[in-house]
Image: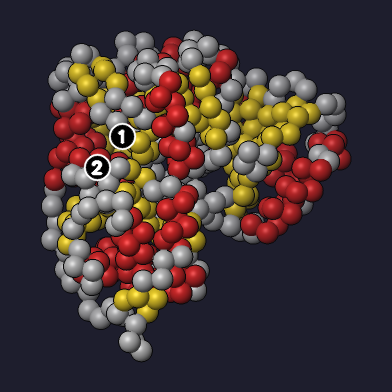
Amino acid sequence: MGSQLVCSEIIVNSGVAFGTSGARGLVNDFTPDVCAAFAIAFVKSIDNEFSFNTVALAIDNRPSSYAMAQACAQGLKQLNIDTVYYGVVPTPALAYKAMQDAMPCIMITGSHIPFDRNGLKFYRPDGEITKDDEQAILHNDVSFTPLAELSVLAVSNAAELAYINRYAALFNNDALSGKKIGIYEHSSAGRDIYKSLFESLGAEVTSLERSDTFVPIDTEAVSDEDKKKARDWSKAYGFDAIFSTDGDGDRPLLADENGEWLRGDILGLLCSQFLSIHALAVPVSCNTAIEKSGCFKHVVRTKIGSPYVIAEFADLNRKYKNVAGFEANGGYLLGSEVTLNGKLLSTLPTRDALLPAFMLLIQQQSISELLSELPQRFTASDRLQNFSRGKSVSLINKLKNDAAPFLKKLGIEGEYEINTIDGLRITLSNDDVVHLRPSGNAPELRCYAEAKSTAQALGYVQSVLKLIAA
């Protein structure tokens, strides 16, 4: 037994940690044995609740992802667990297929973070793992043999086909007829799916900027370069919309006919209206237009991260018929079955990029017209990179006790309210909001703001981050 490794010891010494969604770390930290330890600990932490003999795997387009999938598969072999490998597909495609087949799955992806980092997302047969599951993985003491050679993985296209059919079967084949749509493909895990799917529903589609190198698109902090690209593309092609996603295809990025990218929470709000959702779970950072719209019977605010949103679904489903959630990054989580066009759309309680995009694109009005009908509350966000979690926590603790001197330096005086559900959310006397929060998976401090205009919200973000960086 001298050569045996213990999962919990390998994991704690790896430098890899759980963030808001999955385990994240530097590629160099995801050694084959670390990947195996996570996969084995995951399976052993749920095998008393579920009966299964196969685990599904899929990856994003990062250079490091395939070898990590191989290591997960090799580790699971030691438990006599088979794996089915779906290749490069969006995270929701993997999760959907695995839930249909009542099996657990692991998505190898770092989502939007730079390509020198990567991650693992874990799904039980009934959906995303909980924060309790994360703790069970971290503390699992099962042992395994160090990995030797890694085996080649045979690819199945079953997850891709199931995901395509989920939406192709929901809409008529002329649902997007007359719509001109650009698809910003970059290195998204779903880039080989989207064009044919949109075309099958009648859209005229133009593929834009496919990349052979990994592009870390953050749907919550769209770069100035990507903002300019969308405006230029719209002028050049006359698009009704431009669709894109983050790296693993679970967060949508949708631009209107003017090439202006929508905020993810506004996209989620509109989608929820069109799906006739009764009750919503959304993170505390989402736009207050959700409540101000008066469209929902109940809205519950959570900590940031899909596990917290999903944790509210069971309670909401006991009291309301149509239940959903979404995040400020745009990822849409369907917490109950809903009926659309007389057809039943099954639950998918994990972030999905396609549903909210489709729900806006099938409307007769232009996207900018749909936006104009909402309560006019505007948000902005950005981040300080290479800002340690320790510095973030120290700053937030200081401001929690007394934010007045900090606000005064920004030229803001008067009463304010503090909310500490997640980070520090300050609501000013004029109803504007400034929210600081350490990233859950990178050394970054995020700043969110909400105001009566985009310029005002952006001004808050820029001024706050400039003051903190000084």
Q: Mark 2 belongs to which amino acid?
A: Met
Q: Which color scheme does this rendered protein use? A: secondary structure
Q: Residue at x 70, y 25 (%)?
A: 432
| Residue 9 drawn above or below residue 448 | below
- Place residue 381 in its image quadrant: top right
Q: Nearer the viewer, residue 44 or 447?
A: 44
Instruction: Decide which of 459, 92 is in the foreground and name it.
Output: 92
Cβ–Cβ under 8 Å for marks 1 and 2: yes
Q: Amino acid at mark 1?
A: Leu
* Residue name at image x 58 percent, y 57 percent: 443
The residue that appears at 63% across and 28% down in the rendered structure is 450
Question: Alpha-carbon distance for marks 1 and 2?
Answer: 9 Å
Q: From this view, report whether residue 182 is shown above or below residue 152.
A: above
| Residue wearing tag 2 | 99
Q: Which residue corresponds to mark 1? A: 348
Quadrant showing the N terminus: bottom left
Residue 339 location, x and y as percent? 26, 18
Residue 469, relative to residue 355: is it above or below?
Answer: below
Residue 15 appears left or right of 179:
right
Give whichever of discs 1 and 2 has the lower sequence position: 2
Element type where label 1 sits in the image: strand
